[in-house]
Amino acid sequence: LTTSREAEAVLKKLAIRGFSRSTLERKGHAVGERLEQERDVMESALIEVFEIPKEAVSVSVSIDRVTLPMEKAVKRAKSTSKKKAAKRPIEVIYKEAYVG
């Protein structure tokens, strides 16, 4: 996948006219909206026809450009008694996750 700016540059190099960056952006969003409208139907159709191989033992999932909650270790406050303090104090922070 590429950005609308990159797509525009490629089209210019290939001497293909008629597609500005804003047009590519607008059309890309329109396609995305249409796919989202049809997603349930498409996913159901795929589930019906896709057969998981008997040899399959795991599933890998790739996520890109989303924020996920992650644990960050924090030092225990000195004022907290050891009995009442968390054994492994953490702070939950959200970070962008991506593949590659």
Image (cartoon, rainbow, N blue to C red):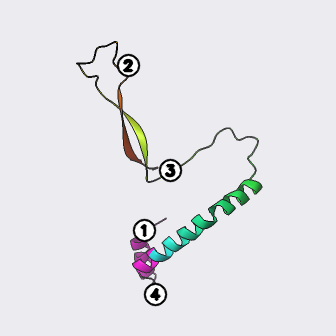
What is the three-letter code of the residue carrying label 1? Thr
Q: Secondary structure at mark 3?
A: loop
**Marks 3 and 4, how far apart in space?**
33 Å
Which sits earlier in the primary sequence, circle 3 or circle 1? 1
Task: Name the spot of residue 34 as percent of width and height, x first.
Answer: 58, 70
**Marks 2 and 4, how far apart in space?**
63 Å
Q: Secondary structure at mark 1?
A: loop
Position of 84 relative to 21 (above/below): above
Label 2 CA crowd tier, 10 Å (few <14, some 14–19, many 20+)? few
**Marks 4 and 1, how far apart in space?**
17 Å
Q: Are marks 3 and 2 in contact (CB under 8 Å)?
A: no
What is the three-letter code of the residue carrying label 2? Lys
Point out the stretch of residues depicted in magenta: 1-25
Task: Name the spot of residue 90 as percent of width and height, x first.
Answer: 36, 29
Closer to the camera: disc 1 or disc 2?
Answer: 2
Position of 71 relative to 46 (above/below): above
Which sits earlier in the primary sequence, circle 4 or circle 1? 1
Q: Are marks 3 and 4 in contact (CB under 8 Å)?
A: no
Pointer 2 residue: 87
Query: Residue 3 got which mark?
Result: 1
Residue located farthest toward the top when viewing the structure as drawn = 83
- In the image, 57: left or right of 95? right
Query: Residue 63 got which mark?
Result: 3
Label 4 CA crowd tier, 10 Å (few <14, some 14–19, many 20+)? few
